Amino acid sequence: MKFEDLKKRLDKDRPMTTITMRMPEDVIDDLKRIAPLLGFSGYQPLMRAYIGQGLRSDLEKLENNSMNTLIANLKRNGVSDDVIQLALKDL
């Protein structure tokens, strides 16, 4: 994740939107039970944390996959490993 994107995600005043989501009652009960044990004020912040963790994980996988594809293409087109490593270091 890019530094600027990460910085925006850490902003506590980010705009929020309301959604409606159907979930099994027992899952909500479990979330309500575990949230305070994990230091959350309620089950909804815990749900946001779980969704955020999964999203960050998937974004990282996709970004790494794109980066690996780019590196492979550069190598196929004759760009040396040294040049690629220098460029990656600058990131």
Image: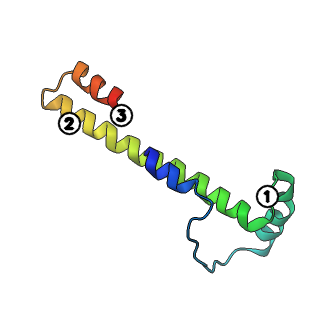
Q: What's the amino acid at mark 3?
A: Leu
Looking at the image, which residue is at 28% across and 29% down?
A: 87
Label 1 crowding class (10 Å Cα cut-off): few <14, some 14-19, many 20+? some
Residue 91 marker: 3
Please give left or right for residue 80 compared with residue 46 in the image: left
Task: Establish if 12 lies above or below 68.
Answer: below
Please say if 57 is above or below 31.
Answer: above
Q: Is residue 17 left or right of residue 33?
A: left
What whole-number distance in Å separates the C-alpha atoms at marks 2 and 3? 18 Å
On the image, numbered disc 2 is attached to which residue?
73
**Which residue is nearer to you in this view: 18 or 33?**
18
Question: Quick one: SS at disc 3?
Answer: loop
Label whose residue precedes the other's in the sequence (2 or 3): 2
Front of the two marks 2 and 1? 1
Is the residue under label 3 in contact with that under label 2 (CB below 8 Å)? no
Dot 2 or dot 1: first in sequence order is 1
The numbered mark at residue 40 is 1
Give the image location of residue 41, x and y in percent.
Answer: 81, 62
